Amino acid sequence: MVRARTYKELVYFFQRICDELDTVKFFSWGEPEEMNVNESGPSWNWTPDTTYPNNQYPFVFLQPTALQVVQGFYQYTCNLWVLDISPSTRIELLETHDTMLHIAQDILAKIKLTPWRTTNGEMYSSNKTDASISYPINFLPQTEISKNGLSGWLVTFTINVKNPLDLENAPY
């Protein structure tokens, strides 16, 4: 299991969630300009930590945009793109949006249901998780977001990660 109290651990936690979902074929993170999407699949201007074969759609892209430290928690605000190749008809577009929405909901549900490891190695179950999602969660449909034609959803949310400000976890 993954302990997600740092920025790096948070990114790896999302990667693990996406790797465990059969419906997600590619995951990466960073700034959207780093993404290079073409017919052979998404790629990046740098070498990713995990090797994915070509033609990996649908894919998920995580962009942590802000971090706020509050008493006992880190609050990460994130953009999460869940995208597939744009279809050629409106009926297929409806199906693509529906499928990408289900994938986004699965990812958010796994945050709640995945056990998290504490600093002393103890596991929390889903009802005592180290993380929670703040509401509201915003879903914005995306159609033809790049010159290569991708459609899906942009999900903006805040994840609250327990991080007590003690000598072991001090951010300074």
Image (spheres, rainbow, N blue to C red):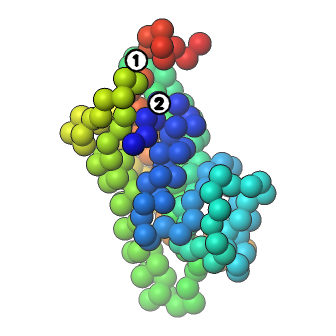
Answer left or right for 25 relative to 20.
right
Answer left or right for 26 relative to 114.
right
Residue 90 pos. (x, y %):
49, 87
Dividing the image into 4 quarters, which one contains the N terminus?
A: top left
Q: Does residue 27 sit above or below 129 in this rendering?
A: below
Dot label at residue 48: none
Query: Can you see residue 99?
Result: yes
Sequence-first tag of 1 and 2? 2
Report which residue position mark 2 lands on.
Answer: 5
Which structural element holds mark 1? loop
Please tell me which residue lies in front, 70 or 169.
169
- Classify mark 1: residues with Cα within 10 Å, few (<14), some (14-19) or many (20+): some
Farthest top residue in view: 167
The residue depicted at 57 percent of the width and 37 percent of the height is: 8
Answer left or right for 32 relative to 107.
right
**Type of residue at label 1?**
Pro
Please tell me which residue lies in front, 29 or 146.
29
Residue 110 pos. (x, y %):
34, 53
Residue 60: quarter of image:
bottom right
- Marks 1 and 2, how far apart at CA: 10 Å
Dot label at residue 164: 1
**Type of residue at label 2?**
Arg
